[in-house]
Amino acid sequence: REGMKRYIFEGTAKNRLRCYACILSLMALPLMTIDVSAGSPKEDILQEKMTEISSVRGRILEKRAQIIEILHHLKEQRAEIEGEIKSEQERLKIGSYQKAIGFPRIDYNLRLVQRLHSYISVLGDKVAYLQIGNEILESLYEHADDDLRLVQTLNDMEVENLTSQIDLIIQEYLSETDDLVSIHTALPGKPESIWNEIVKGTQNVH
């Protein structure tokens, strides 16, 4: 009986030791997983560039929205002035441009419409330019995201080429978001052509 008790006790002790060893090995698994999943320098670089792209795209869209709002007000102002010119032409029964510019108010309004044409044209081009930049950065973001999924297969040169391209586009469009909206351009068209468009009812609506 004493031998049997000793056998049972020793067997139980060995089983306990095996259980403790299993528990300790399971506790070590998360530590091993953390080491395996640690990010690589290439992964960190791509994630950083994706964050930069998102930030710049946000600024581009904000600037674009500001310019669109300005365009809306300029077009409203242009339509109001053109309506005033048309009303004066009908009220005074003015049949020619030469007679029209003999009225200081009409002459002034024609030149003001000419300037508004210029502002609207330049700002319209700027909106289109910012939209192109936003689409380019969106494409680069998707490229970086794809590369991030396959980062283990990329060499350093491939990552460097992509990041250089991203930096170039960011630098170009970041300056556009920092600048105040300013217009320096020659005035398009002539007051006479603007007069003819208003009288004939063919003035710009865009």
Image: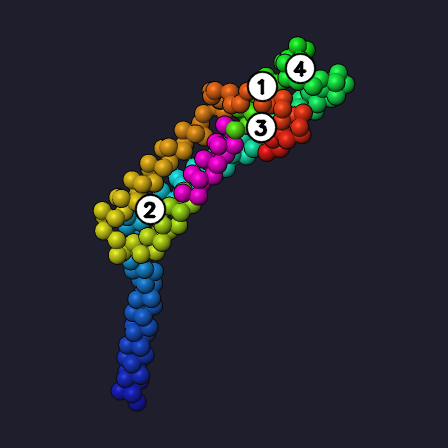
Binning the other alpha carbons within 10 Å of mark 3 as few (below 14), some (14 to 19) or many (20 upward) gives some
Q: CA distance from mark 3 to mark 1?
A: 23 Å
Q: Secondary structure at mark 3?
A: helix
Asked if residue 102 is positioned above or below residue 14 in the image, the reply reads above
Q: Of the two numbered discs 3 and 1 on the same chain, state the one appearing first in sequence.
A: 3
User: Which of the 4 quarters of the picture holds residue 1?
Assistant: bottom left
In the drawing, what numbered circle is on residue 70?
Answer: 3
Q: Nearer the viewer, mark 3 or mark 1?
A: 1
Amino acid beneath label 4: Ala
Tell me which numbered mark, 3 or 2, is placed earlier along the sequence.
Answer: 2
Q: Position of residue 15 (x, y in %)?
A: 31, 77
4 and 3 marks in contact (CB < 8 Å): no
Q: Does the magenta run of residues contain 132?
A: yes
Name the residue tied to disc 1.
191
In x, y percent, where is residue 34? 32, 56
Hey, which residue is sitting farthest front in the picture?
95
According to the picture, the residue beneath numbered tag 4 turns out to be: 100
Which residue position holds label 2? 46
